[in-house]
Image (tube, helix red, strand yellow):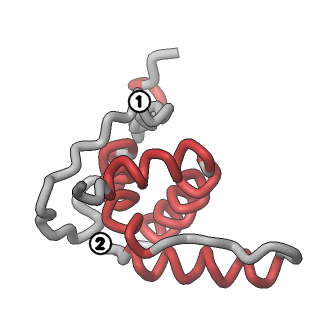
Amino acid sequence: MAHDLGAEFELYHEENPHIFEELKERALVLKNAGRKRGSIAQLFEVLRYDHAVRTTGEEFKLGNNHRAFYARVLMAACPELRGFFIIHSQEHEYEPDLVALGIREVPRWPKRREQWDW
């Protein structure tokens, strides 16, 4: 039976939705600092470091197999991050289903206040 990394990622995300939020926050900070491109590997290592410094007890687990999936989900969910990560083709291309993942697309805020719809 083939190993389904997409299904493994989705289960991990379901059990750890805070990881997506933390990666999104860090990616947007990097983007807003003027970076045209980001590295999901860099964000993973920062997240690992932060958790190692802030927590005690059980070791924080963040598998490298999930990096490519998080990059795709982040770019699908956040208009500002579209094209921010370089992604490579996968044996079985993964198209994130934000609804199934419980993620709502982050709206892109218009720059001018008169364009806001509220």
Q: Position of residue 102 (x, y in %)?
A: 50, 32
Location of residue 111 (image quadrant): top left
Which residue carries the number 2 mark?
36
Q: Position of residue 7 (x, y in %)?
A: 36, 47
Residue ID at (88%, 77%)? 56
Location of residue 105 (image quadrant): top left
Instruction: Kindly identify the amino acid type of the residue bearing the numbered disc 1.
Output: Ala
Tell me the SS state at disc 2: loop
Tell which residue pokes out farthest to the right in this image.
56
Judge the density around disc 1: few (<14), some (14-19), many (≥20) Cα neighbours within 10 Å: few
Q: Position of residue 16 (x, y in %)?
A: 62, 51
- Is 93 above or below relative to 99? below
Which residue carries the number 1 mark?
100
N-terminal label among 1 and 2: 2
Q: Nearer the viewer, residue 45 or 37?
A: 45
Q: Nearer the viewer, residue 28 or 112?
A: 28
Q: Is residue 50 left or right of residue 19?
A: right
Tell which residue pokes out farthest to the front in this image.
1
Tell me the SS state at disc 1: loop
Instruction: Kindly identify the amino acid type of the residue bearing the numbered disc 2.
Output: Lys
Residue ID at (48%, 60%)? 28
